[in-house]
Image (cartoon, helix red, strand yellow):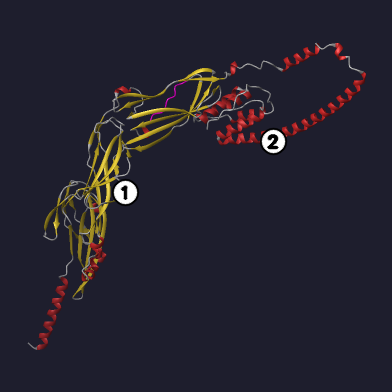
């Protein structure tokens, strides 16, 4: 065989060897987990690695994980190398998975391009379980104390429905968890939940305990599950290598440095308390048909707007009732029922309701302002006001009361008011009687010498009074012009207020108008104004306006009727009503 043929064979052999070597670079796909068993609430790191010549075009299909896992984050790294002129690509994905519950799970096969990973079996242990973690130094396993766990405890497992029970949510932490938000409660529709202040942190034998305090109010009776508390946060791990740094790791290894051990990797944690059942007692039979108010203590007090209120027929007097309950949520407070009174109109406003945390109790308070308008004069009794409640400590019904009060009301009802005893006709009759008794001799004994002086003095006096009369007439005319202008302005303002539904402004302008239209009457409130008008239909409208102002009722006023009386009556102000002192209108 000549040398030329031999050289050709050798070259062909070498080419074939290189070709076969290139063909031998096959694509591979693998999946592993950092730990096959972890306590519930901690994440598992799923690591997917690909090696081949098409890594930059591939992405894993993670949708198959959504059934049993929550994906809390993904990261990726990419590396390219060349062997004998052939490029090889390595790509890795790290996926943080949070299992949905305890027990054994299968991480299904993950599709990446034309390849699939093998399924992986994992075991999720109860939260707080001691686990065996791999030890890199000995290549064996070492027992590790629980990293995290959470527990919800209550001080009363057999409360009455709507009674406050105190709960403590404790987070046990061995890894330095950072919370992302306050704990939340799932399935809490049958509960009222109130925070009892800031959490407390304690260190017990190297374990950090974070305690959160709550007041729970069950809204149903019977066998009930406590609401499940969920805590979310993360901790920083310095054990794993972050994939994003692998492509530059060689540079830092040259200086014996590890970027990942300097900054660490954030790993999410989601903890849930175990379901716990309690027995909730129904409404006590002793409560009967009363509003159910289970509490530790209830107090009802009364305070008048004026320390020494003066009661007068038709005038307003304001009173403030304050109901305070311990161990009660604000939505559970009852309405304060005012006993009906024939001789007293009562207009309660909408209550102002608040709640505060005091120690380990929720204190709720309702303040109701009531306007009273006496309808009859004389001695009267304001009835007792009572709020029934159930004492959870003594297990019996109790009552918070404002005692009955005796008051004296000045004035009379409209039907009993009498006209003035002395009228103009009686005064004229008295003057006539006195003239008739005058002696004829006394009128004819004036001296002739003094008559001229008397006539001159009389003329001067008459001229003086004539000047005063003329000035008065001119001044009165000017006053009337000003009054007419003022009446027209107030009439327009009243009309605007009624159309806009601004009843407080309408009340104020009506009282101003009444004071100008009836200057000789003391018009202190809308009832006084109605008395001056003297029309039953107008009085009915003023009662409706009072009800809207003081009782918060929706009323339909007859604006046309009110404005008709305003336009007609300001020229007729000679109707008299008894004088009344000015009261403070309740606002």
Image x and y of residue 412, in percent: 57, 18
Residue lying farthest to the right in this orientation: 448
Residue highlighted by disc 1: 181
The answer to whether residue 64 is visible is: no
3D distance between C-alphas at marks 1 and 2: 66 Å
Q: Is residue 102 magenta?
A: no
Q: Which residues are magenta?
A: 333-340
Question: How would you classify the magenta stretch by its main secondary structure?
Answer: loop
Q: Quadrant of residue 436?
A: top right
Per the image, label 1 sits on a secondary structure element best described as loop
Residue highlighted by disc 2: 485
Residue displayed at 19% across by 55% down: 109
Residue displayed at 72% across by 18% down: 424
Residue displayed at 89% across by 24% down: 453
Residue displayed at 53% across by 20% down: 409
Residue 418 in the image: above or below residue 513: above
Q: Of 54 and 278, which appears nearest the observer?
A: 278
Residue 102 in the image: above or below residue 290: below
Q: Is residue 545 left or right of residue 138?
A: right
Point out the tag, 1 or 2, that comes first from the N-terminus: 1
The answer to whether residue 42 is visible is: yes
Q: Residues within 10 Å of mark 2 (few under 14, many from 20)?
A: few
Image x and y of residue 89, in percent: 22, 68
Residue 134 in the image: above or below residue 475: below
Q: Is residue 137 left or right of residue 215?
A: left
Image x and y of residue 167, in percent: 27, 38
Tag of residue 521: none
Residue 340 in the image: above or below residue 154: above
Instruction: Name the quarter where the N terminus is drawn.
Output: bottom left
Q: Of 97 and 275, which appears nearest the observer?
A: 275
């Amino acid at each position: 065989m000549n040398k030329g043929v031999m050289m050709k064979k050798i070259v062909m052999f070498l080419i074939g060897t290189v070709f076969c070597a290139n063909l031998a670079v096959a694509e591979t796909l693998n999946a592993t987990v950092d730990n096959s068993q972890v306590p519930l609430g901690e994440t598992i790191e799923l690591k997917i690695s690909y090696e081949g010549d098409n890594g930059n075009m591939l992405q894993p299909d993670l949708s198959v994980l959504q059934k049993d896992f929550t994906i809390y984050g993904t990261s990726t790294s990419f590396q390219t190398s060349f062997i004998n002129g052939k490029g090889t690509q390595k790509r890795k994905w790290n996926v943080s998975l949070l299992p949905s519950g305890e027990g054994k799970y299968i991480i299904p096969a993950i599709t990446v391009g034309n390849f699939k990973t093998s399924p992986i079996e994992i075991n999720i242990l109860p939260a707080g379980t001691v686990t065996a973690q791999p030890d890199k130094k000995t290549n064996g396993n070492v027992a590790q104390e629980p990293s995290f766990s959470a527990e919800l405890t209550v001080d009363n497992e057999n409360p009455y429905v709507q009674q406050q029970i105190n709960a403590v949510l404790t987070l046990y932490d061995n890894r330095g968890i950072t919370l992302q938000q306050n704990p939340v409660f799932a399935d809490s529709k049958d509960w009222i939940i109130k925070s009892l202040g800031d959490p407390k942190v304690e260190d017990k034998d190297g374990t950090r305990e974070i305690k959160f305090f709550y007041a729970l109010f069950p809204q149903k009776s019977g066998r009930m599950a406590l609401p499940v508390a969920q805590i979310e946060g993360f901790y920083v791990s310095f054990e794993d290598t972050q994939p994003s740094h692998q492509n530059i790791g060689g540079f830092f290894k040259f200086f014996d440095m590890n970027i990942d051990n300097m900054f660490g990797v954030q790993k999410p944690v989601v903890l849930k308390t175990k379901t716990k059942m309690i027995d909730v007692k129904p409404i006590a039979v002793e409560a009967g048909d009363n509003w159910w108010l289970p509490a530790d203590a209830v107090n009802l007090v009364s305070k008048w707007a004026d320390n020494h209120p003066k009661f007068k027929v038709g005038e307003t007097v304001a009173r403030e009732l304050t109901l305070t309950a311990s161990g009660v949520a604000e939505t559970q407070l009852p309405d304060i029922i005012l006993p009906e009174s024939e001789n007293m109109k009562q207009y309660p406003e909408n209550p102002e309701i608040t709640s505060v945390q005091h120690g380990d109790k929720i204190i709720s308070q309702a303040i109701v302002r009531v306007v009273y308008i006496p309808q009859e004069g004389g001695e009267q009794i304001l009835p007792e006001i009572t709020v029934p409640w159930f004492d959870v400590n003594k297990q019996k019904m109790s009552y918070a009361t404002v005692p009955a009060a005796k008051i004296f009301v000045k004035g009379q009802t409209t039907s009993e008011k009498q006209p003035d005893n002395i009228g103009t006709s009686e005064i004229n009759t008295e003057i006539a009687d006195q003239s008739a008794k005058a002696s004829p001799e006394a009128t004819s004994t004036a001296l002739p010498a003094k008559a001229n002086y008397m006539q001159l003095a009389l003329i001067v006096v008459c001229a003086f009074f004539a000047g005063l009369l003329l000035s008065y007439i001119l001044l009165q005319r000017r006053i009337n012009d000003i009054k007419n202008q003022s009446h027209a302005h107030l009439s327009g303002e009243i009309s605007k207020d009624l159309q806009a539904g601004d009843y407080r402004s309408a009340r104020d302008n009506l009282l101003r108008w009444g004071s100008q239209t009836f200057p000789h009457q003391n018009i202190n409130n809308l009832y006084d104004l109605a008395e001056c008008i003297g029309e039953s239909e107008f009085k009915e409208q003023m009662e409706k306006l009072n009800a809207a102002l003081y009782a918060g009722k929706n009323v339909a006023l007859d604006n046309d009727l009110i404005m008709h009386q305003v336009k007609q009556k300001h020229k007729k102000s000679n109707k008299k009503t008894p004088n009344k002192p000015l009261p403070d209108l309740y606002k």
